[in-house]
Image (spheres, rainbow, N blue to C red):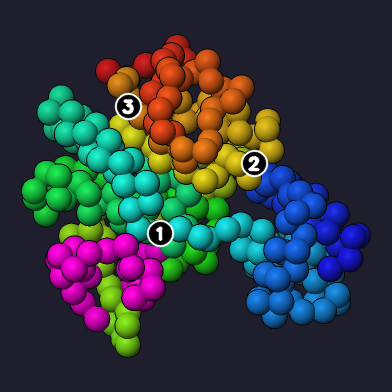
Amino acid sequence: MSGAQFERMRRLSLALAGIELADRHRELLSYRCRRLKIDNAASLDALLASSEQGDVPARRRFIGLVTTRHTAFFRNPSHFAIACERVTEAIRCRGTARLWSAAAATGEEPYSLAISVIENLNRSDPPVTILATDINAETLAVAASGEFNDAALRAIDAERHARFFSEPVGAGRWRISTEVRHMVEFQSLNLVDAIWPVEGPFDVIFCRNVLMYLEARHRESVLRRMASLITPGGLLILDPAEYPGPAQHLFGPGRNGVYSPCTLPVEMEWI
């Protein structure tokens, strides 16, 4: 990958996804190009040119190149316990709860939420819906299939495996149970788009391992918009290493990545 090609990738990444690439990402992107069979200068130039010209398949492929899909079941387990506490309170007050996983990748996070809710409420049909969104259409398709291999299920203990992953779909592959899949709705969403096809309110929003990749102005905008979509008493859950930064005034003091909005815009008052 030449310096000129990397600069083109930087501009495209920022324009299409709000992602700010640094020099340290160049080696990683070179590796991803080789893995995706973009293994010479001509093929990379062709992808960049098509993406710059607005070709939709090319842009999807480019987004897949610059976004990370690393995730796992039950990362930061305490976050799921805290989310379940909020779900229980919402159901007690309103009879239902809504959750949003804003960077669902291949689905481990929203499915972990669904499993946690089912276990916490001790019912297979809880009055809870989970919206799962991601900018990467390819990873969303993997997530919607609900199929995982043994490596992805390493964090799942035997009891959960037997209850929620009992359907084999091939050698070393398992499909998550219907009760879990029915709780989760998958939808494509670019967080830096001017319009979000998402309606609030939500009792909990998970936005983990996303902000660190966005340009500063986009981080603040995303957090401001999310704050307006959270119910009073609701939660925004970030990775423990992330923080609201310039949008901190919209949230109370956080701990371990968990924040609650302290103000709501006047136009977004929830009854």
Q: Is residue 101 magenta?
A: no
Q: Residues within 10 Å of mark 1 (few under 14, many from 20)?
A: some
Question: Could you tell whether 188 is left or right of 66 in the image?
Answer: left
Where does residue 154 sit, x and y in percent of width and height? Answer: 33, 68
Closer to us: 167 or 266: 167
Q: Is residue 162 magenta?
A: yes
Q: Amino acid at mark 2?
A: Leu
Residue occupying image coordinates x 26% and y 67%: 176
Residue linked to disc 2: 214
Residue linked to disc 1: 72
Residue 244 falls in image quadrant: top right
Q: Given the current orientation, which residue lies at the most extreme left position?
A: 122
Asked if one can make out residue 161 in the rendered structure from this viewpoint, the answer is: yes
Quote the CA–CA distance across marks 1 and 3: 24 Å
Quote the CA–CA distance across marks 3 and 2: 24 Å
Q: Nearer the viewer, mark 1 or mark 3?
A: 1
Q: Which residues are magenta?
A: 143-168
Q: Given the current orientation, which residue lies at the most extreme bottom position?
A: 171
Residue linked to disc 3: 234
Q: Nearer the viewer, mark 1 or mark 2?
A: 1
Location of residue 87 with respect to 114 vertically, above or below? above
